[in-house]
Image (tube, coloured by chain):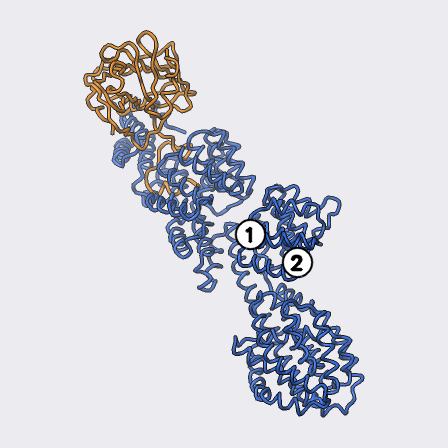
Amino acid sequence: MESDAEEETSATPAAAPAAGRLKGSPELTVDADMREMAKTAAWSVSSCKAGNGVAALRDDNLDTYWQSDGAQPHLVNIQFQKKVQLQLVVLYVDFKLDESYTPSKISIRAGDGFHNLKEIKTVELAKPVGWVHISLSGADPRETFIHTFMLQIAVLSNHLNGRDTHVRQIKIFGPRPNPVPRQPFHFISREFITYSTIR
Amino acid sequence: METLMVDRIHSSLRLFMHRNAIFLCERLCAQFPSETNLQLLATCYLHNNQPYAAYHILKGKKLPESRYLFAMSCFRMNLLREAEDTLCPVNEPNIESSIQVPSGATGNYLLGVIYRCTGRMSAAAEQFTQALTVDPLLWAAYEELCILGVAEDADECFSEATALRLQQEHASTSALEKSNFANENRILSSSLPSSLGDIIPKQMKQLHANITAEVPGYHHVRGTALHVQNSTTSNIVQFDTPSPATAQTSSIVPPPLFRNVHAYQNTISVDAPAKQKANGANQPLRRKYLDEARLKKVSGRLFNQSSESLPRRSARLSRDTTINSNSNISQFGGNGTDHSSGKLRVNSSTPSKLCSTAIRSVQVRKGKPRATENFDEGSRNEVIDEMWTDNEPATSSSVTTDGRFFEQDKAERIMSQDSKLAVGIRELLGLLRLLGEGFRLSCLFKCQEALEVFRKLPEPQFNTGWVLCQVGKAYFELVDYLEADHYFELAHRLSPCTLDGMDIYSTVLYHLNAEMRLSYLAQELISIDRLSPQAWCAVGNCFALRKDHETALKNFQRAVQLDSRFAYAHTLCGHEYSALEDYENSLKFYQCALQVDERHYNAWYGLGVVYLRQEKFEFAEHHFRRAFQINPRSSVLMCYLGMALHSLKRNEEALEMMEKAIAADKKNPLPKYQKALILLGLQKYTEALEELERLKEIAPHESSMYALMGKIYKQLNILDKAVFCFGIALDLKPPAADLAIIKAAMEKVHLPDELMDDDL
């Protein structure tokens, strides 16, 4: 499923930097029971160069990229219309093309708004090429998801000490809603699923 | 030149040479400008898919046929208002009854379709019913009535009464002729000299022989009474025309013949099809006359008393025999129904004509070839008049006895033709009755009965694409997807180009989770017809199965674009928007679907689900109830209605509904599960547990069931069982969301239950 996620160890409850470094994989591999959550969210960035704005992060085109244009940390803010359950953040970065623009240290913060964001995850990347999967789950199965109104992805530093950063695509994943409304649990067996909806 | 051109244009149209037809027709209209020719040109344009051209040339024309063609071109160009105005002008509300193209029924049908497209369902139903009364064989009108849900029993629409009416319609056109001849006969009989008795039979024999000479020929060709009909038809048609001519033969017709004629007239008007017997009786008679036919030429010469008539007679006879075969062949090639109706007309009036047969028959045959091109009575009149004068002296008393045979044979032939038509009508009506009843029942979602009716069909009819698709659809509504799959697959194999039911087939495969087969079906359908909405629905279902809702949505939108009157495409778009949680758009699309077809219960259901998600429970209940009213047999609908009631806290009604759903379909696990949920909400823990135990037998691998059981045990404080159930639930690999909840629940089992957070 997620590549290199096992490299991380989040032993301490405090937001400690991850021990392993992510390499990125050429394929975007996501569980079938997850779906992209941020289509109706409001995306904004701390700064950008003309022609390489925030839209490049969501255009499903790996050739276009967002280029920041200011002081570090560079921030990508994602605000949802209601509290959502999130499980996975995936970024596409390419060291071979972007070199010193490639982010090396990323921090993910969550909260209700700009005023109470709290860091929930930090990862370090090592010359990544491809999709970098960052899981937001804790070790406890009860902590599979984070429930939040807002997510902030902060690029703290780049490779080769570059000032600005290039990110080509960002996707946010969460669980699928139950196709049958108002149910406590999902149905998984064929017998139930066949009879559960009218199409 | 005009008739020649018209003929060529018609044959070009028949052979699909549209450009040729258009060119010739334009030349025709330039040279002979008349409204009929303009109509022909419009027909050519419509055949060539250029409704705008037809619109342009027919604008403002007043003849009924022109108005119908104009309305058809408006309809094709989607100018519904204009089409409606043409068919039914505002200031002449009864005009549609006068639309005679063809026979008024299709005018009513077109008007009905327009009303349906513009949302006036009751007016549409009226029009379709009217169309059916005018033409009971207009299946499309009955189909529309079924779809509107207001069709009456097929037994009534395609009944004995209808059969009689159809026959009478055919008969009535010749009734005039019949009455004409009756009058003539009366005149003739009154003036009959008895001395003719001897001469006439012989002559009749000759003439009869002549006529029957054709009959064997017919028999060789097809051996059915139809051929006899052909000859007699034309004979009789010929007989019809010369009323002044018959007066001339007053000396010829003997009273006995007339009496016989009356007798035969009576038997035929009773519409008793003794066709088989008649046929049987005909055979020996005809064989008898066969020999006579060979003598005809000789006897004709012997027989002819007037020198002038002799050469003409023999010439006529020889001409007749050759021409007859030709004319017969040309008649065979024509349109079956026209001929049969023509024959009927002839049949019923044959007996009356038989009395004045002898000479007329010869005349008829002579006239028949000329009339082959078109039954132009005027030309026949000329021929017959001419022949009459020749034959006058030749009439003899031999007519009497032979005439009786002749007449009898003819009458029998007519009867057999008549009864053949009657049997034909009844067979067709019987078939339509079965199909109509089956279709009506399946539109009312009485699927079991519909299936029974369809099974009564004869095997060749059953094994056709349409019927098999209907059977598949019935199983689909019964939520028996395996059977539906089987029948749809058979239908697709037997007629791969029937696209009508394939959207439902793709939904069946979607429900069965058959990804490979669904994608194969979608590929096939696209390759058959890229412009059919059903193919794109299948492709969309493919993507929806893989949970790629955006691509699925794109495909469904393409289907909508291709045919905005295809309700299911709208509904599927609505489903996809709902899955993408874009409720505004999904509501819009469901309502579009309902505008097209108010009885599309899937759209009502979809609306109910959206409102349920949005927690607008009253709305949800209302919409589920509407869906339930349309399809009262669906256990899934009942279940959802119960869920809406439960959300409204009307728990008794909810439980009732669940009981109904359980009773309606034993295999459906969902109502049982929902019942358990409701009972849990009512804190009737033991009953809920019982229900879930029963459920275990049907669906043993459902983690949600065990999770619920675990919850109930926790409430009952039977903690070890609770943990056990949660464990099983976890083993069955629920999705991540459930995993989290169940694990949390498991850990909290030993804690007091304030933190159970997954109540409804």
Distance between the Cα atoms at labels 2 and 1?
28 Å
Count of numbered marks: 2
Shown colour of chain A: orange
- The three-letter code of the residue at mark 2 reads Ser
Q: Identify the subunit bearing mark 2.
A: B
Question: Do marks 2 and 1 share a subunit?
Answer: yes
Q: Quadrant of residue A49?
A: top left
Q: Name the residue tied to disc 2.
A: B103
SS at circle 1: helix
* Residue B195 image position (x, y, % from top left): 77, 92
Q: Identify the subunit bearing mark 1.
A: B
Does A122 sit left or right of B558 as displayed?
A: left
In this view, A55 is above or below B456: above
Which image quarter holds the C terminus of chain B? top left
In this view, B597 is above or below B316: above
In this view, B409 is above or below B197: above
